[in-house]
Image: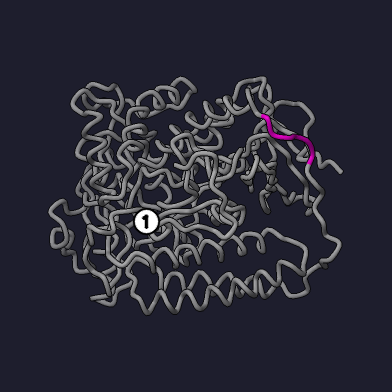
């Protein structure tokens, strides 16, 4: 039975339709791709919560791009390669960087109001500098770039003539079809099963092309800067569908989240350090110069490890970030959102340091894609944080993530349109979801207990600093949990919490197994038993599922 849903184009639509393109995820990648689809392409955009509720909404710093005459493409490429610690795909880095200015101009044309006054350099925009960048190249909308970007793109989608919006739907699994091409097996994605969170009914959404734009998996950790929706859904679904994943051991911990019980995920933007913010110990001593000559402007992995080291050395709960030496008017102008929220929580950043701690922030690995955003399964694409493109390598450089979302939505659009123009695959509705052998759960406490246990041991054993023993302990626990969760999943009707937990436990196992395979320390992965970088391991960590089938051409 079709489930009516909200639309943004005043046309009736439901999840039980056949679409040309099904986009799962409504962050920067999903929104920009939906907005870029031509009017004659029937597109559905799936959002787990409200349309704009995702990591993009909370992104403060900005988007990196070469916009100033004193900067260069080569410089941005080299900075990214340096931050990636030898694991970036240089051709992908150059592709993304070269497409950067055009995508900023596209956003500006769509109505995103970037900060333009007072201008810095020749670009006309106010450009800031963040960790790892050798130039000021981060364009921003004050300190709420993500919010400005998300709200603007959502507003523009209201004018799109052919987009069906499915809010409050969470994807359960992808539907994969198989067929023989001579002696060779081919696998293609035909759609997805979605749980309508309003009606609690499962619906079938068929499409010719499916795009995963579901973001990262930082909610697998106890402390994270991410909103509750960042549960690795796309990575887990793609893995179960037979897609390879890569570099899952590289989880970026943002060095500076506000330390306050009422602000569990409130980020203090890297731009605060970019504008002169100093990291201090409780006694007021600066410490970053002991770890890196760039001090507070070192790459995030270095800063996060330094803070973690000092907290453990001194037995303190937090360190402090101080920008009170800047004028009050400049702080209010550059960081209005952060300043306002801190005041609400009792901190005045104009006059005092802010207590900060590291928190899981960004998933550098993900679903392995090629340079057209294609995965290992025909008809299935992945863009944004859920994808591994080769851009970030072993460590994402600040403000390259929104840029990647924009560029690969542009790249994916071009390939999807080619696919739709000559798609020979069978189409039509997919089978209805079968609930004939499950019942309603009478033990929801199992889900909540497993959720807490998973996030706690991932933080303790697979966090900023790892060891062989910690990883072994984590793997034993995650496999026990996965067995219990899968048994629960097979016996009871699905719920939002169960689906997210199922995805998180799959992603946790991928992170642990990837970390065990990398027997060195590089970028975001630091193992006490292998503290040095090994040049012989300068390759991505690629995990292959049992159901993997090579495509027509490997990448």
Q: Nearer the viewer, residue 472 or 336?
A: 472
Where residue 317 appears, as percent x and y from the top left, is 33, 71
Residue drawn at (38%, 63%) of the image: 259
Residue drawn at (50%, 66%) of the image: 509
Where residue 539 appears, as percent x and y from the top left, is 32, 53
Residue drawn at (73%, 75%) of the image: 443
Magenta span covers which residues? 424-429
Q: From the image, which quarter does the C terminus lie in?
A: top left
In this view, the residue farthest toward the front is 183
Q: Nearer the viewer, residue 149 or 524?
A: 524
Where residue 195 appears, as percent x and y from the top left, is 73, 51
For mark 1, give the secondary structure.
strand
The residue under label 1 is: 252
Quarter-of-image position of residue 180:
top right
Can residue 257 be seen from the camera position used here? no
Where residue 548 appears, as percent x and y from the top left, is 56, 53
Is 390 magenta? The answer is no
Number of numbered callouts drawn: 1
Residue 192's place in the image compared with 291, above or below, is above
Magenta segment's dominant SS is: loop
Q: Nearer the viewer, residue 376 or 394?
A: 376
Is 428 magenta? The answer is yes
Q: Is residue 57 left or right of residue 501?
A: left
Q: From the image, which quarter does the N terminus lie in?
A: top right
Residue drawn at (31%, 26%) of the image: 125
Can residue 214 be seen from the camera position used here? yes
Residue 355's place in the image compared with 233, above or below, is below
Q: Is residue 436 left or right of residue 531?
A: right
Residue 310's place in the image compared with 61, above or below, is below
Q: Residues within 10 Å of mark 1 (few under 14, many from 20)?
A: many
Q: Nearer the viewer, residue 151 or 418?
A: 418
């Amino acid at each position: 039975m079709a489930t009516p849903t909200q639309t943004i184009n005043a046309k009736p639509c439901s999840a039980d339709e056949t679409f040309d393109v099904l986009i799962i995820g409504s962050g920067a990648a999903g929104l920009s791709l939906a907005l870029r689809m031509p009017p004659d392409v029937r597109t559905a955009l799936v959002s787990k919560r409200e349309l704009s509720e995702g990591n993009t909404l909370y992104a403060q710093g900005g988007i990196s791009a070469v916009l100033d005459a004193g900067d260069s493409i080569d410089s941005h490429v080299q900075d990214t390669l340096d931050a990636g610690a030898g694991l970036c795909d240089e051709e992908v880095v150059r592709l993304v960087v070269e497409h950067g200015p055009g995508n900023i101009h596209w956003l500006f044309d769509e109505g995103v109001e970037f900060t333009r006054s007072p201008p810095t350099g020749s670009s006309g925009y106010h450009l800031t500098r963040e960790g790892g960048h050798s130039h000021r190249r981060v364009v921003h909308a004050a300190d709420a770039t993500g919010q400005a970007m998300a709200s603007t793109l959502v507003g523009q989608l209201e004018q799109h003539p052919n987009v069906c919006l499915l809010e409050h739907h969470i994807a359960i699994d992808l539907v994969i079809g198989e067929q023989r091409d001579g002696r060779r097996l081919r696998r293609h994605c035909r759609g997805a099963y979605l749980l309508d969170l309003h009606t609690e009914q499962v619906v079938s959404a068929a499409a010719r092309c499916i795009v995963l734009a579901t973001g990262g998996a930082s909610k697998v950790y106890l402390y994270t800067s991410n909103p509750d929706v960042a549960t690795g859904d796309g990575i887990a679904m793609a893995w179960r569908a037979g897609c390879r994943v890569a570099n899952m051991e590289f989880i970026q911990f943002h060095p500076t989240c506000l330390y306050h019980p009422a602000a569990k995920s409130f980020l203090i933007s890297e731009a605060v350090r970019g504008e002169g913010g100093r990291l201090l110990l409780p006694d007021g001593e600066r410490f970053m110069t002991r770890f890196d000559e760039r001090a507070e402007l070192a790459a995030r992995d270095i800063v996060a490890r330094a803070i973690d080291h000092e907290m453990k050395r001194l037995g303190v709960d937090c360190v402090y970030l101080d920008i009170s030496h800047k004028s009050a008017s400049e702080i209010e102008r550059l960081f209005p959102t952060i300043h306002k929220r801190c005041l609400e929580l009792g901190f005045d950043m104009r006059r005092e340091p802010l207590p900060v701690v590291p928190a899981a922030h960004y998933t550098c690995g993900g679903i392995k894609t090629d340079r057209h955003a294609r995965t290992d399964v025909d008809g299935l694409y992945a863009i944004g944080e859920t994808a591994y493109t080769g851009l970030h390598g072993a460590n994402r450089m600040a403000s390259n993530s929104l840029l990647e979302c924009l560029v690969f939505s542009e790249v994916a659009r071009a390939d999807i349109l080619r696919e739709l123009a000559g798609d020979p695959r069978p189409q039509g509705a997919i089978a209805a979801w079968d609930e004939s052998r499950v019942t309603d759960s009478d033990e929801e406490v199992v889900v909540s207990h497993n959720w807490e246990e998973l996030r706690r041991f991932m933080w303790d054993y697979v966090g900023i600093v790892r060891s062989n023993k910690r990883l072994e302990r984590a793997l034993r626990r995650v496999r026990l949990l996965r067995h219990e969760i899968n048994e629960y999943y097979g016996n009871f009707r699905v719920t939002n919490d169960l689906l997210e937990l199922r995805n998180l436990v799959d992603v946790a196992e991928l992170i642990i197994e990837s970390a065990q395979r990398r027997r060195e320390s590089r970028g975001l992965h630091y193992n006490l038993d292998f503290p040095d970088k090994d040049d012989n391991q300068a390759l991505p960590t690629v995990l292959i599922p049992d159901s993997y089938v090579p495509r027509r051409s490997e990448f």
